[in-house]
Amino acid sequence: MMSVLAATSPRLRHASGVFVIDRAARFVEEHGIVLASARGPAPRLIDHIAGEAITGHWWSHPRAKAIYNVLAQVQGRDDVLVCRLIRGKVTLVHRRLWPALVRLAARFPAAALARVSDEHTPAGRHVSRTVAFPDWVPPGVLAEGRALTEAAALAGLPTWLEMGGRRKA
């Protein structure tokens, strides 16, 4: 696996990071659903960014700060939902799959589809924020999801995705 960080010139990698962030965002788009850092059935974004399977705690990786910065930028994109869809772990879902999630929302625990984010306050405290489903869903995506058949929505999601404790059939 080629590292997103290694695949760019040092100038691009360290100057703006835009190229690196775009490659990581494309990884999310290509896979549709990825885990941020937890191990599970989906690809892990931190492994893609690092260019290798990270063993142990990823914060001990030599490029942990760079990995974190890219991860944070991808999580902040408008076309990426950050939720806890897979086993309660931080999951990134590309916008192209949002209509399928809308259509199949009843199959998931409500907390799994809530948008989550972390912030640092000016005082230095860490605060987690949650926006319940469907409050975060744009109106056009709600309409698209409601128009989908259940079969079409299921066909758009990975077969390994668990819904309500059951694997997708």
Image (tube, helix red, strand yellow):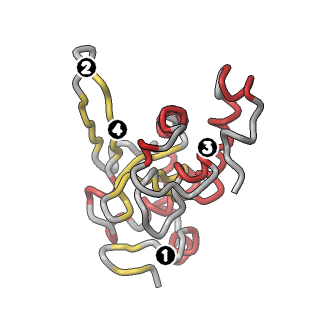
SS category of the residue bearing label 2? loop
Helix, strand or loop at label 4? It is strand
Label of residue 160 in the image = 1
- Horizontal and vertical percent position of residue 121: 26, 20
The answer to whether 164 is drawn above or below residue 63 in the figure is below
Q: How many marks?
A: 4
Q: Which dot marks residue 25?
A: 3
The three-letter amino acid code for the residue at tag 1 is Trp
Callout 4–callout 2 Cβ contact below 8 Å = no
Name the foreground residue: 41 vs 49. 49
* Sequence-first disc among 1 and 3: 3
Look at the picture and state if 151 lies above or below 27.
below
**Residue 46, relative to residue 70: is it above or below?**
below
Q: Amino acid at mark 3?
A: Ala
Q: CA distance from mark 3 to mark 2?
A: 28 Å
Question: How would you rate the neighbour count of disc 1 (Cα within 10 Å): few for under 14, some for 14-19, many for 20 or more?
Answer: few
Q: Secondary structure at mark 1?
A: loop
Label 2 belongs to which residue? 124
Alpha carbons under labels 4 and 3: distance apart = 17 Å
Q: Which residue is mark 4?
A: 117
1 or 2: mark nearer the eye: 2
Image x and y of residue 96, in percent: 58, 54
